[in-house]
Image: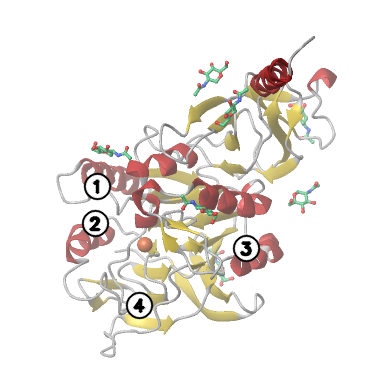
Amino acid sequence: MMTTNNKLFILLVTILVSIMATTAEVTPVYVNIGFTAQQDEMRVSWYTVNNSTAGVVRYSNQSMELDLAAGATASASSSSTEYGEFPGWFGFVNTAVMSGLAPLTQYFYQVGDASADVWSPVFNFTTGAGATVFKPFAFSVYGDMGGGNYMLNVDSLITNSDRFDWILHVGDIAYADYSNSSSNKGIRSGMLGNMTVWNDFMTSITPFSAHQSYMTCIGNHDAFLNKSAYTTTWIMPSESPLITWYAFDYNGVHFVSMSTENDYAPGSEQYVWLENHLQQFRASNPNTWLIVYGHRPFYCTTVINWCMGTNNLALYEAMDPLMMKYNVDIFIAGHTHAYERSFPVYDKVVAGTFAEPKATVYISVGVGGNWEGLDPLFNVDKPHWADYRKTELGYGILNVVNETTIHWQFIQQSDDTAVMDQFTLIKGTF
Ligand SMILES: *[C@@H]1O[C@H](CO)[C@@H](O)[C@H](O)[C@H]1NC(C)=O
Ligand SMILES: *[C@@H]1O[C@H](CO)[C@@H](O)[C@H](O)[C@H]1NC(C)=O
Ligand SMILES: *[C@@H]1O[C@H](CO)[C@@H](O)[C@H](O)[C@H]1NC(C)=O
Ligand SMILES: *[C@@H]1O[C@H](CO)[C@@H](O)[C@H](O)[C@H]1NC(C)=O
Ligand SMILES: *[C@@H]1O[C@H](CO)[C@@H](O)[C@H](O)[C@H]1NC(C)=O
Ligand SMILES: *[C@@H]1O[C@H](CO)[C@@H](O)[C@H](O)[C@H]1NC(C)=O
Ligand SMILES: *[C@@H]1O[C@H](CO)[C@@H](O)[C@H](O)[C@H]1NC(C)=O
Ligand SMILES: [Fe+2]
């Protein structure tokens, strides 16, 4: 006869054994794709709770030929990085590179684990024309999105996704250094970050981040856990995974991302890279569109600590001469929760016009929506280099019309058909 205690013990052991034997949870939770430095590649990354034993992306230019057994499909194994030994953080970011892709071609793909036979839905993307092959395109851009009412922007981006080819989030992604709360106000969770907030954000953007390249730069709200959540999740085409500055080409336009959250002073590792890169690029491409972006602006007039006084002086002094010297056409930033843009300007003096620019145009678009709300005030003494200024949630669409014309639009979030501001920039030489 078993005693009640014995029965309980057997029950407990059975439960424990079944918990330990539970199959690994390798279902893709969120998915995002991004450019690499190679034109015939696309990176795809996805999160799983447990490590995949056979993580893989399978892809094809035919929508329904993803079955590996059917033989019509290419595949690439993934590698994974564990989020690490941080309180509240667990799981793995899996990443794989699809290669051998033809230009201007639609591809279909699924990510998952081949041994568990667990797969994401089928997503698709379209490849670009090439590094030096010019083809008109558009990208959407915003910063400072996550928490609070950002879902409005997400809905608007989904609605308008046929108006752009890829997405650029200029830092402050998810605001996972805050926790959610019932009062719908963020609570500061500090430098440990909150993985639930991070993963919920990543899941909410998956409808477009799995379909169009989602490029990022690091913002101050992404620097928690010593930047490791950011660098684990967002694998950009930098020289190594921990470096947060990089460059890439798309349809004959050159993009350079700097990190305002790392040392950018003359002589720093980043500054040396940036100057060498810009110099080398311009030496052989004197007439190519060149767009630089980073999280914090330096031509800005929003009344927050960053723009006022001397706080952005070091960034301004380091970057203003570089933008001018290497004929950077546009610099895009976020950080201030307002929309504003300049005339072509160098050394705080307007240089030329949009039709004949003699210096860089500066755009701040940190209005994706977040816990902290908008920054409603602008410096009352509007500098003469400041053009349009408005505090409104939304995002930009930068349309590269041809090799000499860019058309910029700012779309208001609350009415996603409304163009609140726009300008046409002709390629300048300076
Ligand atoms: C899966 O991950 C969870 C969370 O880290 C962990 O508790 C569990 O033991 C893991 N399961 C397996 C089978 O590895
Ligand atoms: C995940 O599992 C794979 C395959 O077993 C292994 O090669 C890899 O080292 C693991 N990754 C991590 C981060 O533990
Ligand atoms: C699809 O890919 C296959 C294999 O790479 C290739 O032979 C075929 O021409 C491609 N079809 C189209 C429509 O691009
Ligand atoms: C490609 O993906 C988009 C976004 O999910 C979807 O709307 C579209 O129908 C897909 N195209 C095809 C041919 O499946
Ligand atoms: C993290 O955020 C989630 C969702 O907002 C919240 O329920 C949880 O309490 C937060 N965790 C911590 C440690 O703050
Ligand atoms: C961050 O880095 C510092 C210095 O390298 C170290 O002392 C600290 O423990 C790290 N914090 C975390 C959360 O990893
Ligand atoms: C570029 O586009 C603009 C606006 O449509 C047009 O006026 C201009 O002629 C085009 N330039 C070239 C070189 O095609
Ligand atoms: Fe910021």
**Residue reaching furthest to the bottom:** 380
Q: Which quarter holds ligand 3? A: top right
Circles 3 and 1, Cβ within 8 Å, touching? The answer is no
Going from the N terminus, do you reach mark 1 or mark 2 first?
A: 1
Q: Secondary structure at mark 3?
A: helix
Distance CA(mark 3)–CA(mark 1) = 35 Å
Q: Residues within 10 Å of mark 1 (few under 14, many from 20)?
A: some
> Is 89 placed above or below 386 here?
above
First of labels 4, 1 by sequence position: 1
Q: Earlier in the sequence, mark 4 or mark 3?
A: 3
Marks 2,3: beta carbons within 8 A: no
Element at label 1? helix
Can you tell which mark lies on residue 154?
A: 3
Q: CA distance from mark 4 to mark 1?
A: 24 Å
- Name the residue beneath numbered marker 2: 322
Q: What residue is disc 4 on? A: 343
Circle 1 sits on which residue? Answer: 275
| Camera-side residue of 331 and 14 | 14
Left or right: residue 49 compared with residue 323: right
Is disc 1 in contact with disc 2, using a CB cutoff of under 8 Å?
yes
